[in-house]
Amino acid sequence: MSRVGRNIHVSVDRLRQLAHRDARPRKIKADAGTCPKCDSHYSADEMSRNLRVCPACGHHFAVTARERLEQLGEPGGYVELWPELRAADPLQFTDLKPYAERIADAEKSTGMGEAIVCAELEVRHVPAVAAIMDFSFMGGSMGAVVGEKFARACDHAAQKGLPLIVLSSSGGARMQEGTLALMQMAKTVIALDALAEARVPVVVVLAHPTTGGVWASFASLGDVTYAEPGALIAFSGPRVIEETTREVLPSDFGRAERQLANGQVDAVVDRRELAQRIGRILHILSRPDVDPTAGTAPAGLQWAQGGAQKVKSMMDRIRPGSTDGEDAG
Ligand SMILES: [Zn+2]
């Protein structure tokens, strides 16, 4: 779906109604802080209602994975999958502090076991499997557990015939796990490949930032790819490139709007319309195959004929046992 040469449409749907047109920064009694883009003050309540988007200028703040699940599905209406998986430390890696200590600190400060949360939920009444990354857990970096949970989410979605919703927010592969982390790029791509074979749709949402090994693997392989406004989507960030090449990059380098113009994403979607947008595309893709010889239309949603069985046998061939102990062990 190339968009090269076409005008950029950012959040084409309800943005006009949603956007607050007041250009002046709002100065109110603030209990939650200040927008870094427009200096507006805001209250915690208001930001929560507004899905952590600045009501004045539309700046998208970071959101935790569990907040995302609440925003996408019905409140409290998701079932988390494999929350028990934890990273091992096979390299006994130490930089400024031991890796094991970093993991323990991240768990304590975020309340999450890893940088990805997988869950079953309903988005606008369409059942789906979601794999949501969280930048607050070690920069959303992908180690063996992130790769394993993602691959399991693909298996689970394929076996149940449910669409997969991926939300990426990551600095890339987790350096503390070395080659084991890099291997997750191949592992996640293979898992997605099987979903494609099973004809189960994958919707990817690129949130700020999606870089490195995550952008270079599963995050760039959605059937439909949305990005949040202003998100940095690139293999290397502009600072690294500028320092390496000694050249000045355009100010919008790697940003969602530029990636839309380059044909890398299908739409830039405001977070406040994201659930509706995903729900709509899933409704369109889930239109049941109608068998003209049958008297009645098949009940419920139907993604593919025999797809789940096919992907199961394929995954069994590729990854015997499918839970190969590569995770926390
Ligand atoms: Zn603002």
Image: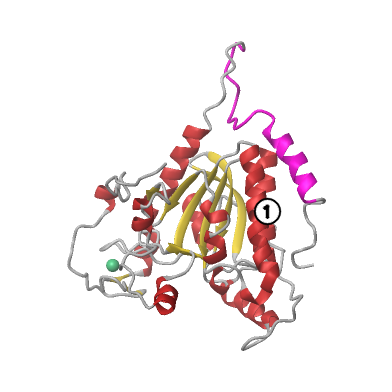
Q: Horizontally, is 74 left or right of 185 in the view?
A: left
Q: Is residue 270 magenta?
A: no
Q: Name which residue lies at 75% across and 68% down.
A: 328
Residue 293 screen position, x and y as percent: 61, 10
* Element type where label 1 sits in the image: helix
Question: Does residue 269 show up?
Answer: no
Give me the residue at 77% from left, 40% from top: 313
- Give the amino acid type for the residue marked by disc 1 in the picture: Ala
Quadrant assignment, res 13: top left
- Identify residue for label 1: 151
Residue 48 visible in image: yes
Asked if 107 appears above or below 84 in the picture, the reply is: below
Q: Which residue is nearer to you in this view: 48 or 271? A: 271
The quadrant the N terminus occupies is top left
Q: Is residue 298 left or right of residue 253?
A: right
Tell which residue pokes out farthest to the right in this image.
321
Which residue occupies the foreground of this view, 249 or 133?
A: 249
Ligand 1 within 8 Å of the CB at mark 1: no
- Whether 296 is among the magenta residues is yes
Q: Which residues are magenta?
A: 294-319
